[in-house]
Structures are given as structure tokens and as C-alpha cells.
Image: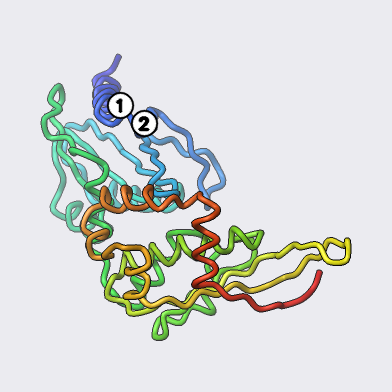
Amino acid sequence: MTDWKKYEKELFTKYSNEYPNHIITIDDKIVGQFSKIKRQVDISIKKDVAGYKVLGVIECKYYNKKVDVKIVDAFIGFLEDVKANFGIIITNQGFSTAAKNRAEVKGIELIIHKFKSVDNLINDVDLFFNQRINELKLEEQEFIRRVKEYTGYIDSSKIDFDNRVIYYREGFANTEYYAWKKLMQQTLRVFRDFPTIEKIEIYIPATKEYIENSNLIHEKRIYTSKIHLKDFEKYMDVKFEFLKKDIKNWRKFFDSIKINNKTFVTEFAKKYVSSELIEKL
């Protein structure tokens, strides 16, 4: 086995042992959203975080010289293609100053890992989640970028940052119940990411089905929630600033509210959700 393969295997073994609740895969293959081909990933880290799948990509560079800026530039494009939430470049020799500067702009973690030594590996993937969440600022570009990270169903033409309004396109929720559930999920996430927001207004189209005079009726409706932070904190019995501080707080809270409990979701809808008929199908 070549030195770089031993290096990669050592890193994979370390991550697998330390993070048994993560799906760690060596030599993974992920189809690129732009390239439309299978892209090779040295080590992938996959985890379900509060109902959303998160992908981390580790690139291993066992070199006889420092990693330069061209490698980092290529890695940034690679991360976008495979839709990774975060990326790590690990090498044995270090990084050029230009490479460090380029990585810092995109929030890529650079780690020097000496062969046959694992003392300086990251403590937990949660480090990256915490870093990304805590660096968020309530600015228009940051707000729009962040809500787009949750799903590809954002209707960008209707986002109104000044009035804190988010629209989703058809397909994000197919039924009334899932519209309720996703209104709650997205409200929680926005307040967690930006706890200085006073209110958030969210619109999700979905289909309502019901029986009328023995006939099955289908209605296309738009479901809306308009929620103030203070009211929602009281309803959820939590401070969103607390949830933003640490992803572990967020995960524990998200699990405790029983997001998949139909009674809980229905109670949320009764209090916060309204709907408007668009057309009968």
C-alpha cells in the first residue's frame, strides 16, 4: 500500500472510531449537480442533523510540498458540485499563505496532519456547524444564502428581506399536513440562525384533500405562517439565542419537540397557520 493510501486509511479509521453516529465512507462516489457525473470523494461524512442531511467532504493531500491556492480553488468548485455543507483539506506538509487566505473566505477548514500521528484531528464535526451558524449575520445576502441552503424549493423572486418574507415553490410540500410541518421547521431554523429577527412570514403551496358529498375534493392552497419571535419563544419554551450557541443544544431541543408527532404539528397549525384557496383541481 502506498504512503498516501495508508494516510487516507488512517484518517478514515480515526473518524470512524470517534464518530460512530456519523456515516463515514472512504473513496465515496457522489453525482455532481453540475457535472452530472460521479465525483470521487476521499472521505465523506454524512449525518442527519435535526431532520436535514448534512454532507462533509474530506480531501487528503499527502504531498512533499505545501498545498497551494490552486488546490483550494479546485476544492471550492468540487464542494459546490457535490452540494457539500462543509469541506476539510488535510495534508502532511502545510499550506501556502495564499491557500490559507482563499480557504478562510469560503470557510474551509485546513488541517496539517503528520503521518502516523492523529493528535491534531478535529474533535467533532459539530465544530463546523457551530462555526457556520455563529458567523451568520442578519444581512440580505447572508439571509437569502442561508434559507437557500435548506432546500432548492425557495422562490427567489418573492423573497422580501426587508419584511422578512420567504416563499417556497410547488413541490416543497405536497399535502396540507406537510405544509404545516415544514412551516414549523423553517420558522424554527430562521429564528435559530437569526435570533435578532422580530418576525418571519412564510408561504408554502400544497394540496388539500377532503371528502364532500361522497366526493374526494382536491384544492390547491397557499399555507401561511406569520410568527413573532417573542410569541414563538414563549410557545416553544426556548430562547433561540441559546439554540444558536451550540448545535448540540439545537439537536436536543429539536428532538424534544417531537417534530414527527402529528398532534404537535396540528396544534402548531391551529395557532399559527392560515390558508387561502388558489383553485380546485
Q: Which mark sits nearer the N-terminus, 1 or 2? A: 1
Badge number at residue 16 = 1
Residue 173 percent location from the top left of the image? 61, 60
In the image, 45: left or right of 202?
left
Asked if disc 1 and disc 2 are in contact, CB closer than 8 Å, the reply is: yes
The residue positioned 64% from the left and 63% from the top of the image is 176
Name which residue type carries label 2.
Answer: Ile
Residue 95, position as x, y percentages in the image:
16, 45
- Nearer to the camera, 14 or 51: 51
Q: Quadrant of the C terminus?
A: bottom right
Seen from the viewer's position, the closer of residues 42 and 234 is 234
- Category of crowding for the residue at label 1, using alpha-carbon neighbours closer than 10 angstroms: few (below 14), some (14–19), many (at least 20): some
Image position, residue 72 (x, y; %):
28, 49
The residue depicted at 70 percent of the width and 77 percent of the height is 277
- What residue sits right under mark 2 in the picture? 24
**In the image: residue 69, left or right of residue 260:** left
Does dot 1 land on a helix, a strand or a loop?
A: helix
